[in-house]
Amino acid sequence: FQALFISIIFIFASTIVSASQQPVMKEYIPPSPKYKILKTLPQRYRVAVLPDSFDWRNVDGTNWITAVKNQGTCGSCWAFAATGQLEAAIKILSNRSELPIDLAEQELVSCDTTYSGCYGGNFPISYFKSIGLVDEECFPYDTTQDTLYWLPCEDICDEAGFKHNYGMRAQIIDANYSLSDVKSAVFHTPMFFTIAIYYSFWTLGEVSDDYVWSPDTSDPSDSIVGYHAMLCVGWNDAQRCFIFKNSWGNEFGADGYVKIGYDCLLPSAPKPVWADGYLFITDAVTAKIVQNWTISGFLIKSDTSFWDISSTPQTIETSQFFSKSNNWYIIENWRWTKYLIDTTETSSGDGYSFTEAVDAPMTIEWECAETTAAATECLSNDNLIVYPNPFNPKSGSQATVSFKICKEGYVDAKIYDAGYNLVDELVSSQYYSTGIYDIFWDGKTADGRTAVPGLYFIVVDNAAGEYGVSKIIVRF
C-alpha cells in the first residue's frame, strides 16, 4: 500500500545541476485510509473499440486542453497535473471547448492541508469535491516559491469564498498497470498519472514531436532520481506511446509535451516507469452557483451546493420565501448572469425557477423585500401560501401554511401525497372566524414517521365555500 496510491511528496533535488534539470518528488507518504480504491475500472468507463491513436489536443480539429504552465522552483507537479485534469474535464463534459478556463494551482499548494505544498501532494480528491478551485486571477501562481517558503493560504483573494466556481468528484481505480484501462480512462477525460523519473528524463530538454522516451536499460547510471505527476492526454499505437502534458514549461519536451513508451510503463519492464498503477477517474465535474440577495439595498451572498456540469439543460429552483436572522423575505424579481460563455442578463421570472444549461459558473441576482409571508387575499389556490417550500423536516424545520378566511366556517386542512393518499390531518372540522391564520406541518405522517422526500399537497377547505390547494416539496 505504501508505494501504491501515492500521497506523494515532491521534493527538489538539493542542487539543480543545470537549467534543464527539473524538480522531482523524492519519497512517498502513507495514503489516507478514508479513500476507497476500486479494484477494477467500472464498466461505464470501458470502451469496446478504442482508436489506434487519440489526442485531446486535436479531436476532429478541436483542442480541449489548457495551456502548458511552469511550476518553477516548487515541487507542485501534483497540483498542475490535477488542475489540468479538472480544466480539461470541465470543457469536455460541458461540451464547451471555448471556455477560457484557467484555474489556480496555487490554491492547492497553499490551502490543501491534506498535502504539503511545495514538498508535494497527490490528486486532491477531497479538496476538489468539497471546496473546488478559484481562478488564476484570484490566486496567481508564484514561480519563485520553493520548499523553504511558499505562499500562505491567506494570500488568496478576498472574494475566494464566492469564486470556487468549479469542483470534481473522482474515484481511485486500481488499474493494475493495464494499458487498455489507461486508454479507456483517458478517452473519458485526460488522466492524472504518476511516473518514476529517471536521469535521462530529468535532463531531457527539448525534443521533436516524434521522440518517444524510455529509460536507457543499457546505462546503469540512468537511475531513478524521483517521481513526478503529469497529465496523460492521449496515445499513439503506431509509436507505442502515451502522450503527457508536463508542467516544466514549453521548452521541455515537444512544446511542453512528452511521449513515453508503452513497454516501460509495465512493472515487468527492466526499468519500470508507472509508479503506482492507479488512475483518478473523473466521476463528475461541478459548478457552484452564487446567489446574491439584495434586501433594502444590502447585498447578502450565499452559494448553493455544487451542481453537476452537463451539456443538458437543468432547472435550478429557489423558494419564493427565505429567512435571514429570523426575518422572512419574499423574492420580488430576479435576473441571472452567466459568466465565461456570455454575459447576457435576463430579467424575468416568477421567483421560483429558471432553466439554463449549467456549463459555466453562474451568479443569480435576487431582489427581495421583507414580509410576514402571510396571505392577504381570501382563501383560493392562488392565495394559500406555504413557506419555506421546499423544506427539510430532518433538519428540524417545518412548513408554515398561511391563509385568509373571509367567510367564517368549519375548516379542514389535510396533507396528501402525489397519489392523493391522505398523509396527515392538520386541522379537522375546526371553526374559524374571519382573519389570517397560520398552521404548521412538521413533515410527519399521521403515525409520526418522517415523510419521504417528494411532492405533497396541502388542501384547506372551508365549509362556508372557500377552498385552496398548494404544493409542498419535502427535500432532505
Image (tube, rainbow, N blue to C red):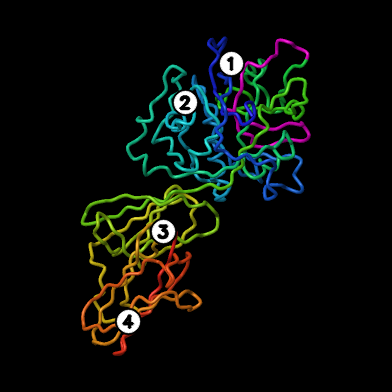
* Mark 4 burial class by Cα count in 10 Å: few <14, some 14-19, many 20+: some
| Residue 394 circle label | 3
* 319 and 255: which is toward the camera: 319
Distance between the alpha carbons at the discs numbered 1 and 3:
59 Å
Mark with earlier residue (2, 3) = 2
What span is colored magenta in the figure?
Answer: 218-246
Distance between the alpha carbons at the discs numbered 3 and 4:
30 Å
| Rendering coords of residue 325 (x, y %) | 25, 54
* Mark 1 burial class by Cα count in 10 Å: few <14, some 14-19, many 20+: some
* Mark 2 burial class by Cα count in 10 Å: few <14, some 14-19, many 20+: many
Question: In the image, is residue 323 above or below residue 53?
Answer: below
Mark with earlier residue (1, 2) = 1
Numbered disc in front, either 1 or 3: 3
Left/right of residue 390 with respect to residue 309 in the rendered view: left
| Residue marked by disc 4 | 380
Left/right of residue 353 with respect to residue 6 in the rendered view: left
Mark with earlier residue (2, 4) = 2
| Residue marked by disc 2 | 117
| Residue marked by disc 1 | 20
Give the structural element (helix, strand or loop) at label 4.
loop
Left/right of residue 128 with respect to residue 304 in the rendered view: right
**Callout 4, which amino acid?**
Ser
**Is the stretch drawn in magenta largely helix, strand or loop?**
strand
Mark with earlier residue (1, 3) = 1
Quarter placement of the N terminus: top right
**Callout 3, which amino acid?**
Lys
